[in-house]
């Protein structure tokens, strides 16, 4: 299994399909956090928005902390 930084480097170099691996890896983590802040019927939508924003901001991930901390 590739580590997060390796996947992120691949995504940033144009292999955007790799982002699906990050989503699969962290979907439950994000959903648990989102669930604490929004009604249950909005969790999936807000979690999706988190990943869209993460994708758009991925070049800002410096790898200085774990990806799940940055994502949170």
Image (cartoon, rainbow, N blue to C red):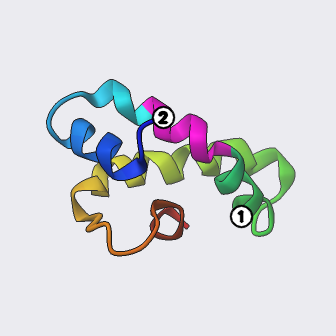
Residue extending furthest toward the bottom: 64
Q: Secondary structure at mark 2?
A: loop
Q: Nearer the viewer, residue 22 or 39?
A: 22
**Location of residue 63 by image quarter:** bottom left
Whether the magenta-drawn stretch holds residue 58 is answered as no
Task: Determine which residue is flagged by label 1.
Answer: 33
**Location of residue 37 by image quarter:** bottom right
Q: Which callout, 1 or 2, points to the residue nearer the camera?
A: 2
Residue extending furthest toward the right: 40
Q: Which mark is residue 1?
A: 2
**Location of residue 30 by image quarter:** bottom right
Crowd tier of the residue under label 1, counting other residues whose Cα lies within 10 Å: few below 14, some 14–19, many 20 or above = few
Residue 49 in the figure: left or right of residue 7: right
Quarter of the image for the C terminus: give it.
Answer: bottom right
Q: Secondary structure at mark 1?
A: helix
Residue 6 in the figure: left or right of residue 2: left
Residue 7 in the figure: left or right of residue 15: right
Q: Which mark is residue 59?
A: none
Residue shown at 60%/47% (left/top)?
A: 26
Q: How many marks?
A: 2
Q: Nearer the viewer, residue 65 or 45?
A: 65
Measured from the top left, where is residue 23 in percent x and y?
A: 53, 39
Residue shown at 80%/68% (left/top)?
A: 36
Q: Nearer the viewer, residue 51 or 12?
A: 12
| Magenta stretch, residue numbers | 20-27
Residue shown at 70%/42% (left/top)?
A: 44
Label 1 to label 2, Cα distance in Å? 25 Å
Prevailing secondary structure of the magenta residues? helix
């Amino acid at each position: 299994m590739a580590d997060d930084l390796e996947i992120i480097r691949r995504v940033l170099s144009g292999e955007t399909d790799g982002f699906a691996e990050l989503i699969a890896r962290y979907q439950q983590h994000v959903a648990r956090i989102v669930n604490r802040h929004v009604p249950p019927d909005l969790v999936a939508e807000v979690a999706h928005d988190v990943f869209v924003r993460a994708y758009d901001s991925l070049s800002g991930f410096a790898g200085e902390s774990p990806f799940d901390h940055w994502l949170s």
